[in-house]
Amino acid sequence: MYAWYLVPVDGVTQLQKRELEQPHAGPGQVLVKIRAASLNHRDLYMLERSAAANSPLIPLSDAVGEVQALGEGSTHFNVGDRVLLPFFPRWFDGPPREEVLPARGEPGTPGVLVDYVVAEERELLTLPEHLTYTEGATLPCAGVTAWNALSTGNLQAGETVLALGTGGVSIFGIQFAKAAGARAIVTSRSEEKLQKARSLGADETIHTPTYPQWDEQVRTLTGGHGVDHVLEVGGADTITHSLRSIRLGGHVDLIGGLGGFTGAVNLGDLRSRLGVVQTFYVGNLATFAAMNDFITQHRIHPVIDRTFPFEQAPAAFEYLAGGAHLGKVVIEW
């Protein structure tokens, strides 16, 4: 079988395709043939981090595949079943703990940009019947993160969700908000992306070059009250605007740092809104299963921007880094 590795060469990370021996499922394990894997901005960070690493690493955390073989004592799945691999292979339920947080695609936990993966049977979930392999590959990180943030904040019909940008988490946020009967507002620097967001159900859009102080436009669109939830993926560049965008008692869900993680925050903005700020890093397997139930109930289809064949994995990384995507970028086998 083949795998793509992040390989540090003279301080620069290269993607190299290598042949290796196919693994076998042991007791309680399942051999999965990977059918599709999606990229996240985290994978671009891993490119940077790997440059200083001492050993190659198989990247990517999000994948879906087909059961090829069962180890001794594995009874939950059958050969041919379509299964999802979670971002955190050992975080099954409950709050985060140090021992369960290693994620796929980071040092010590190989990723999924490989033909076959051996997984513990208990860590796998069945792919919802109405989804394709390509759609399913988008769920483990972006989908679970958006769902975890909004469900933890007890999203209700009639509330308003502000999604920053049009990446994977934000697009899932729009879809989940609309399915729950909530209102969705989206920001972007691109009018073309905002038009696409409206076609996906966004109720209001904000072109940030037109409204550089976009929190003021958020308040205008909400009658001066602010939104109930912000999916905050921008980090240092956007956190101040996000804090000023929430209603009294609103939620700011800290998810990403596209604009960096280091910056000054005016705590007065948070205190004056009596806001709740909480960080989210994907979620556990129980949260993943609950999201799958919601997706199945509402027949939600993830938004795919572009697909690449396995042989063109480096091109997929380059495309994601270019920032032209709306929704998810997926590699197919």
Image (cartoon, helix red, strand yellow):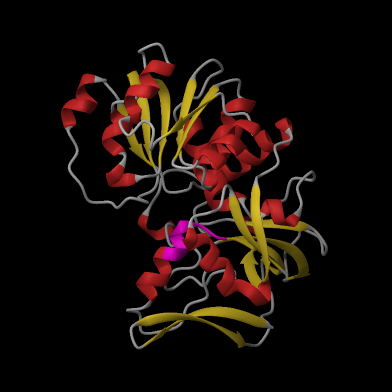
Q: Nearer the viewer, residue 284 or 193?
A: 193
Q: Nearer the viewer, residue 200 or 71?
A: 200
Q: Residue at x 55, y 41 (%)?
A: 193
Q: Which residues are magenta?
A: 39-44
Q: Residue at x 46, y 43 (%)?
A: 94
Q: In what quadrant of the picture does the C terminus appear?
A: bottom right
Q: Residue at x 72, y 62 (%)?
A: 65
Q: Residue 16 location in percent, x, y?
A: 54, 84
Looking at the image, residue 204 sits to the left or right of residue 84; the answer is left
The prevailing secondary structure element of the residues shown in magenta is helix
Q: Is residue 216 above or below residue 132?
A: above
Is residue 115 shown to the viewer in this render? no
Examine the structure image and report whether residue 40 is included in the region drawn in magenta: yes
Q: Nearer the viewer, residue 69 or 208?
A: 208
Q: Is residue 286 above or below residue 4?
A: above
Q: Residue at x 32, y 45 (%)?
A: 235
Q: Residue 88 location in percent, x, y?
A: 50, 57
Q: Nearer the viewer, residue 179 or 196?
A: 196
Q: Residue 283 location in percent, x, y?
A: 49, 46
